[in-house]
Amino acid sequence: MKKYAYVNISTYRAKAVKSLKDQIKTPTKIAKDTGIRKNHISKVLKELKDEGVAECVNEEAYRGRLYRLTKEGKEIVDLLD
């Protein structure tokens, strides 16, 4: 519940998690889906990654990084809906 509260308290984090619900996406695609600027999405994704809610599947890539929800992230997105 602590991580759910952490995500839910921020509209940016909640929108990013909802955007990643069933797909792997790039930060650019998440930004387009949510209407949030890309530089903000990058910060949000770092926060979600640090909390264990999202993960980068190709960390070694400089461009075109792909993000998805972790198991905890999937549980949180179900609570957000």
Image: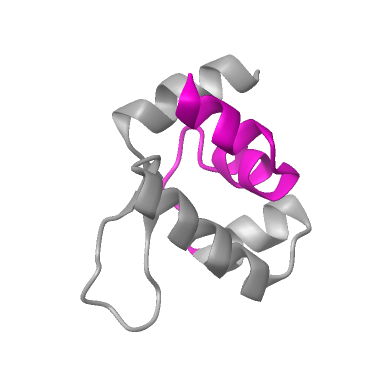
Out of 21 and 79, give the one closest to the viewer: 79
Residue 13 lies left or right of residue 25; in this view the side is right
User: To which quarter of the image does residue 60 belong?
Assistant: bottom left
Residue plotted at (67% across, 42% down) = 15
Q: Position of residue 2 (x, y in %)?
A: 48, 26
Q: Position of residue 81 (x, y in %)?
A: 65, 18
Residue 54 lies left or right of residue 71; in this view the side is right
Residue placed furthest toward the bottom:
62
Bounds of the magenta segment: 1-26
Is residue 12 in the magenta section? yes
| Vertical order, 35 against 52 (above or below) | below
Is residue 13 in the magenta section? yes
Residue placed furthest toward the front:
2
Total marks drawn? Answer: 0
Q: Position of residue 44 (x, y in %)?
A: 56, 58
| Vertical order, 28 against 15 (above or below) | below
Out of 44 and 15, give the one closest to the viewer: 44
Residue plotted at (78% across, 57% down) = 35
Q: Position of residue 30 (x, y in %)?
A: 60, 56
